[in-house]
Amino acid sequence: MRIVTLEAEDDFDGWRDAVRGLVLDQVPPDQMVWQVGEDDPGELFAGEMPVVPVDRGAFSVPRGFIDLARSAILHADRQRFALLHTLLDRVLREPGLMEDQADPLVRKIEGMAKAVRRDIHKMRAFVRFREARDDGGTRYIAWFEPEHHIVRANAGFFVDRFATMRWSILTPELSIHWDGKRLTQGPGASKADAPEGDPVEVVWKTYYASIFNPARVKIGAMLKEMPRKYWKNMPETALVPELIAGAQAREQVMVATARAKTGDNVEAAWAALRDEAMHCRRCDLYKHATQTVFGEGPIDADLVFVGEQPGDQEDLAGKPFVGPAGQVFDRALAEAGIDRARVYVSNAVKHFKFELRGKRRIHSKPDAGEITACRWWIEQELALLKPRVTVALGATAARSLFGKTVTISRERGRPHDLPEIGEAWITVHPSFLLRLPDEEARHAEFAKFVHDLKAVANRLDR
Ligand code: URA
C-alpha cells in the first residue's frame, strides 16, 4: 500500500501531481490510500512509504477528464480521489471511455460532479448576509452549510458580486473573508458565530438583481433550486415577485435578441444599459475620469472587441479606441479585411485610470478589483449582443472575460469556449505595439496581430 496525503479536501492540484507520478510509476489504483491533512490512515498502513510526487515525465489526458475531475474532487465522498485515480487509469487504457455513458464508473463520477455543481449553485442562491461591525467598519456576514467541499471554489463568484464590500462567509469547514482587495481564509465556524437578524435588504437587492439576470442564471433553474415552500421563510421573499417581473422583462429582451438580433427592444435595452453605466460607482475610478466610455458599434454585430480601458483621448471623446491605440487598431482591422463599422468595440474597464504628471494624464493599469467591479458591464453588453465571437485585446480584457490571469502568448490565435460568453479569442492589445522600442519588432508584432485578426475573420466567414 502507498499513501498520498493531500493538503486539503479540495486539493485538486495536489491530487493531479500525485496521480501523475502514480500513473508514470504504474501503481495500480487499488494499491493506493488517499488521505487529507492529518487524518490517521489506521494501523493497517502503518510504516508504509508515503508517495512523494516528482516530475518524471508527461502523458496527455482528455480535456473532459480534467474538467470532470476538477468538479468531482470537491464531492464529500471520501472515495473520490481513489475513484478518479481508477477512472484515469482506465481512460489511459480505454480510449473513448469518457463518452461511454453506460459505464458505471463514468456515470458515478459524472453524478458526483453534478452534485457538486448543484451545491455550488445552491450556495450562490441561498447565502444571505447580515450586517455587522468590526474594527474596519461594516462587514456583511453570512452562514452557509454546503454539502460538498465547494467553498473555496465558489469564493470568486462572491468576490465578483460584492467586490466593493467587506464580507465573510462562515461554514463548518472554513470561513472566507473579503476586505475589498484580498480574499483570506479562516477556520470553520458555527451558526452561532454569524449575526442574527434580518439579512440586509439593500445587499439583497443588488445580489438578487444580478443573480436573476437571465444571462447568468436561467430563471427556471433558479426557481427549481429555491422551492416555493421555502419562500415564506426567506426574508427576500418580498422581492421575488418584483424580481420575476424584472427577469421576465429582461428575458423578453433576451428572446428578442435571440430571435433576430435586431429586435427593437434590444436597442432600447442597450441604450438603458449605457445610460445606467454613465452613473456607475462600482469602483472609485469614476471620481477622476471625465465620463464613462461605453461600448460602441452595431448591436447586431457578430464580432465584439474588448480593450482594456479608455485612454486620455477616449476619456475626453466618450468613445472607445479613438486615440493612438485606436489608430493602430483601425489599421490592423483594415489589413485583416474587417470593417470597423460592422464590429462592436468596448472595454473591460469603462473609466480612464491615470496618474497626473504635471499637466499630463499618464495611463495607469486597472487593478484586479477594478476589473472585477467593471465586469458587470461587459457581461451585460455581451448578453445583449450575443456576438458569434468576442476578442479580448490584451491581458486586462482577457482577465475580465476569462475571470483569471491568461498568458496571451500561449492562448492567442485560437478559439476558447467560455460558459457565459461563448466563443472568445485572445490577442495582444494594440498599445503593446506602440510600446515596442524598435521598428523591426513593431513590424513583426503588427503582422502577428493582423494574422490573429484574419483568423477571427476567417472563422466568421465559415
Ligand atoms: N485602449 C483601450 O484598451 N481602449 C481604448 O478605448 C483606448 C485605448
Image: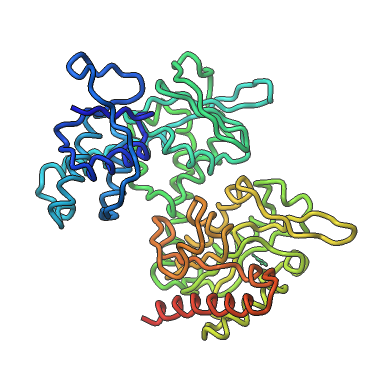
From the viewer's side, name the closer residue of 58 and 396. 58
Q: How many marks?
A: 0
Work out which quarter of the rendered image holds the N terminus and state it: top left
Residue 308, x across and y down, in percent: 62, 61
Residue 68, x across and y down, in percent: 28, 46
Residue 305, x across and y down, in percent: 54, 69
User: Up-down: is 340 above or below 97?
Assistant: below
Which residue does the image show at 57% across and 56% down from the upper left?
377
Query: In the displayed structure, does residue 13 sit left or right of residue 207?
Result: left
Which residue does the image show at 52% across and 68% down from the upper left?
427
User: Up-down: is 145 above or below 347?
Assistant: above
Q: How is the image coloured?
A: rainbow
Which residue does the image show at 57% across and 80% down from the upper left?
333
From the viewer's side, name the closer residue of 267 and 119. 119
Q: Is residue 29 visible?
A: yes
Q: Is residue 267 visible?
A: no
Residue 89, x across and y down, in percent: 17, 45
Query: In the displayed structure, does residue 269 sit left or right of residue 164?
Result: left
Which residue does the image show at 74% across and 59% down from the upper left?
363
Work out which quarter of the rendered image holds the C terminus and state it: bottom left
Most extreme residue toward the right, as rendered? 358
Task: Determine which quarter of the picture holds residue 228.
Answer: top left
Quarter of the render that holds ligand 1 = bottom right
User: Up-down: is 386 above or below 101?
Assistant: below
User: Up-down: is 451 above or below 71?
Assistant: below
